[in-house]
Amino acid sequence: MSVAIRPLTGSEISTAMDDLARLRIQVFAAFPYLYDGDVEYEAAYLREFMAAPDALLVAAISEGQIVGAATASPARANKDKLPASFAKFGIDTATSFYFGESILLPAFRGKGIGNAFFDCREAHALACGAAAAHFAAVIRADDHPARPTDYVPLEMFWRKRGYAPLTGLISNLEWKEHGEADESPKPMQHWARQL
């Protein structure tokens, strides 16, 4: 199965919104996010993402279908969601990019698409004048009951890309996971690198 990587900006992003919503619900349902997807939440989240200046959606397309996607936007468009202590770690929201989701259907993993997602987002961030990039990832216990026996954490991949955890910079993000009646806070570790 051949896969094309296509960066989308501006009005092009709107053409992929339904696919991105579907992928987010499908991929994030698995460990470690265990997200119990909500179409209304997805619509609101994606509208906000599209409104961010210089937003980028990198689509992985196979046989005319989007099978993976990664997002990025200037940190200043997300600064109300970032921890108040963010600046203490040397990340200036005026000159950095926030990398949102990076999602890919299981059948397409292990083919270099994750690197292509980072390459495109980093190139776009640099073209927009960014000096750093950062993202957040959920923290789950090694003995979490929903952790699959064949689960491979992504920390080594992120480190090979030059990212490092910002020690002590953990925020909470709320979502409803499978088995929960309501949303609950989940700890998110922030990672960053200079570009």
Image (cartoon, rainbow, N blue to C red):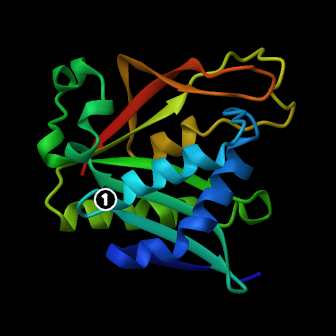
Please give the name of the residue rendered at 24% of the width and 47% of the height, measured from the top-left corner.
77
Residue in front for this viewpoint, 38 or 172: 38
Left/right of residue 151 with respect to residue 75 in the rendered view? right
- Dot 1 falls on a residue whose secondary structure is helix
Query: What crowding class fits label 1: few (fewer than 14 Cα within 10 Å), some (14-19), or many (20 or more)?
Result: few
Asked if 147 appears above or below 102 in the picture, the reply is above
Using the rendered view, name the quadrant where residue 130 is placed.
Answer: bottom left
Asked if 63 appears above or below 19 in the picture, the reply is below
- The answer to whether residue 68 of the structure is visible from this angle is no
The three-letter code of the residue at mark 1 reads Ala
Using the rendered view, name the quadrant where residue 179 is placed.
Answer: top right
Q: Position of residue 17 (x, y in %)?
A: 53, 66
Q: Position of residue 135 (x, y in %)?
A: 40, 40
Q: Position of residue 46 (x, y in %)?
A: 47, 55
Specify the quadrant that holds the N terminus: bottom right
Please give the name of the residue rendered at 30% of the width and 66% of the height, measured from the top-left corner.
123
Q: Position of residue 158 (x, y in %)?
A: 49, 43
- The answer to whether residue 13 of the structure is visible from this angle is yes
Left/right of residue 73 with respect to residue 14 in the rendered view? left
Asked if 148 appears above or below 102 in the picture, the reply is above
Task: State the residue position of label 1.
Answer: 51
Q: How many marks?
A: 1
Please give the name of the residue rendered at 63% of the width and 67% of the height, measured from the top-left corner.
19
Looking at the image, the residue that sits furthest to the front is: 40
